[in-house]
């Protein structure tokens, strides 16, 4: 029998300008950010690293982590719906969105440590951590490193839980180099955008339109640095054998037609977590948070009811 979820005080937290400062309107409306995202956005400094965050509501905390090439506004159809009963915190990972670019590069462990620092700075003892794709990988790392700060995990199409044969690992060292990515991605990014969805609906059309209208070509070079830095985490590390240490409630959710993170690998992940709940969404691609947000909201509620 699982222990009940542990929550910090449900009262509102008064945060002064020394903790967070409002994000200027020009940044809220900046490149790649969805204009319809409704939660207030701030900057928070964590040991000299500026993080862009959305923070609203009071009560048990839900921490939302976006995927590769994303930012916190990608949760626009999921996170705001919880603000009436929960404290909702969304974050741009370093190197993404409006958060700082790091000279030393990026690792999944480093991301988890920065998020732990963010919760501490915001006066939050623990949270249910919700991650999509790369964010799911970071969420799992957070749970492994900081179990007392993790009330539960919701992993949506999480990346990083595949075992790649050594030829693929060697090829990745050649292909996922920053210089090569800088040459290729500016030419193909629009085509790749079309691969993340299985079906088109009002949500996906709005998302594609928003990305195309707010795209800044310079953002590609930030993305390639993140991708090349994270290559060892994505391709060479074996995360599957560490998952027995996740003792908190876990909810897995993925689209059956994901072309980026194969459903077969996520079914294998589910088998490694026999105490977790798992759900596969038929005819859905890599971004259920946009394509089928109601299923993601339902999965979060399922975990909160565990």
Image (cartoon, rainbow, N blue to C red):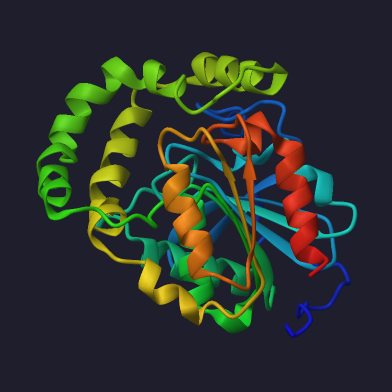
Percent across and percent down for residue 238 are 30, 66
Percent across and percent down for residue 255 are 57, 39
Vertical arrangement, residue 300 with respect to residue 257, above or below? below
Foreground pick, 108 / 54: 108
Foreground pick, 182 / 141: 141
- Residue 206 image-quadrant placement: top right
Quadrant containing the N terminus is bottom right
Q: Residue at x 49, y 81 (%)?
A: 245
Q: Residue at x 69, y 73 (%)?
A: 124
Q: Is residue 259 visible?
A: yes
- Residue 201 image-quadrant placement: top right
In the drawing, does residue 217 fall left or right of residue 289?
left
In the drawing, does residue 4 fall left or right of residue 193?
right
In the drawing, does residue 29 fall left or right of residue 117?
right
Q: Residue at x 79, y 81 (%)?
A: 4
Vertical arrangement, residue 252 with respect to residue 142, above or below? above
* Number of callouts: 0
Q: Residue at x 51, y 32 (%)?
A: 257
Percent across and percent down for residue 102 are 32, 53
Vertical arrangement, residue 23 with respect to residue 153, above or below? above
Quadrant containing the C terminus is bottom right
Q: Is residue 50 visible?
A: no
Foreground pick, 150 / 95: 150
Percent across and percent down for residue 83 are 83, 51
- Residue 221 image-quadrant placement: top left
């Amino acid at each position: 029998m699982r222990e009940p979820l542990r929550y910090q005080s449900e009262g509102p937290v008064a945060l002064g300008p020394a903790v967070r400062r409002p994000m200027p309107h020009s940044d809220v409306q900046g490149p790649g950010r969805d204009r319809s995202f409704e939660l207030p956005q701030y900057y928070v400094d964590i040991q000299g690293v500026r993080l862009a965050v959305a923070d609203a509501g009071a009560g048990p905390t839900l921490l939302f982590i976006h995927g590769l090439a994303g930012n916190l506004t990608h949760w626009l159809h999921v996170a705001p719906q919880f603000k009436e009963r929960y404290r909702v915190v969304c974050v741009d990972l370093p190197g993404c969105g409006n958060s700082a670019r790091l000279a030393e590069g990026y690792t999944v462990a480093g991301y988890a440590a920065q998020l732990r620092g963010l919760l501490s700075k915001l006066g939050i003892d623990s949270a249910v951590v919700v991650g999509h794709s790369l964010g799911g990988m970071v969420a799992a790392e957070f749970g492994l490193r900081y179990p007392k700060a993790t009330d539960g995990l919701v992993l949506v199409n999480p990346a990083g839980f595949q075992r790649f044969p050594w030829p693929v690992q060697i090829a990745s060292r050649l292909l996922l180099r920053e210089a090569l990515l800088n040459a290729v991605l500016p030419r193909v990014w629009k085509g790749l955008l079309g691969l993340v969805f299985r079906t088109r609906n009002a949500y996906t059309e709005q998302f594609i339109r928003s990305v195309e209208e707010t795209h800044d070509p310079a953002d590609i070079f930030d993305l390639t640095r993140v991708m090349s830095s994270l290559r060892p985490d994505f391709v060479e590390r074996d995360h599957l054998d560490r998952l027995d240490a996740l003792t908190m409630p876990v909810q897995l959710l993925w689209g059956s037609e994901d072309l980026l993170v194969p459903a077969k690998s996520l079914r294998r992940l589910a088998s490694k977590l026999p105490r977790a709940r798992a759900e596969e969404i038929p005819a859905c691609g890599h971004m259920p948070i946009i394509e089928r947000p109601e299923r993601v909201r339902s999965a979060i509620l399922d975990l909160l009811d565990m």
